[in-house]
Image (cartoon, grey):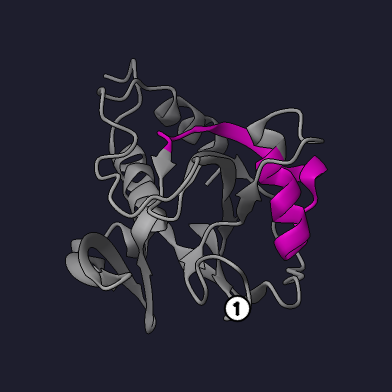
């Protein structure tokens, strides 16, 4: 899989059609807070993988959900990219200095009031995952080829604060990836399945 990093970079160097960052403001309370996530990609056993975290039931937001490493921008973060790599190091032990930025995906606003900037980054492998106690229950390594299978994804109604919300849901080994993470993941899958700009 030599050359995959440049291939993904080319695929991410695309324009996205205009679309509202937030289609449904119902349920968003107060000011929207700036946040960022890292979508870590790496090659294992000659396959491209993406890394997720399963949040604990004790965190303040998104309890028990599958997500990408990330969090709220802090004053010390120079940019949202720095937010993403700082959080990835804090949550799962990925050294910020070892992450290569490949590009970004469209922003997403969650019903919990976060505007998320998703960044795609290549990380070294093997890597010793170090889940942050109290915040990350588990680390999930999922092959991109599995997530590209149409049978792995569906639209489903979930209940949020007593009302139904329609969301994409990806299924993997008994886990459900939904909400903002699923929408970011869908954008990533579109990028990886579309020929890069300038290709014949």
Which quarter of the picture shows residue 75?
top right
Choose between 130 and 60: the one closer to the eye. Answer: 60
Would residue 192 be found to the left or right of residue 64 on screen?
left
Magenta-tinted stretch: 83-107
Which of these two is toward me, 23 or 150?
23
* Magenta span includes 90: yes
Residue occupied by mark 1: 56
Q: Residue at x 25, y 23 (%)?
A: 17
Res. 109 in view: yes
Q: Position of residue 121 (x, y in %)?
A: 60, 42
Q: Within the magenta stretch, is there residue 95? A: yes
Left or right relative to 148: residue 118: right
- Residue found 54% across the figure and 68% down from its top: 141
Is residue 124 visible in the rendered image? The answer is: no
Give residue 157's position: percent from left, percent from top. 18, 69
Residue 95, percent from left and from top: 80, 51
Relative horizontal placement of residue 196, taking residue 167 as reference (left or right)? right
């Amino acid at each position: 899989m030599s050359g995959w990093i440049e291939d993904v970079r080319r695929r991410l160097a695309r324009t996205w059609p205009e679309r509202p960052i937030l289609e449904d403001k119902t349920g968003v309370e107060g000011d929207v807070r700036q946040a960022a996530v890292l979508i870590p990609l790496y090659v294992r056993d000659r396959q491209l993988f993406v890394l997720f975290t399963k949040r604990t039931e004790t965190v303040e937001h998104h309890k028990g959900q599958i997500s990408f490493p990330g969090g709220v921008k802090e004053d010390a973060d120079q940019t949202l990219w720095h937010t993403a790599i700082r959080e990835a190091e804090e949550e799962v032990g990925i050294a910020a200095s070892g992450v290569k930025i490949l590009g970004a995906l469209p922003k997403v606003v969650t019903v919990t009031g976060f505007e998320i900037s998703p960044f795609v980054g290549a990380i070294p492998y093997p890597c010793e995952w170090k889940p942050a106690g109290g915040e990350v229950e588990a680390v999930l390594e999922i092959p991109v080829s599995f997530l590209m299978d149409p049978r792995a994804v569906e639209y489903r109604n979930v209940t949020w604060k007593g009302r139904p919300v329609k969301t994409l849901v990806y299924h993997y080994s008994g886990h459900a990836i939904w909400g903002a993470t699923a929408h970011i993941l869908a954008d990533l899958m579109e990028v990886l399945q579309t020929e890069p700009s300038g290709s014949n």
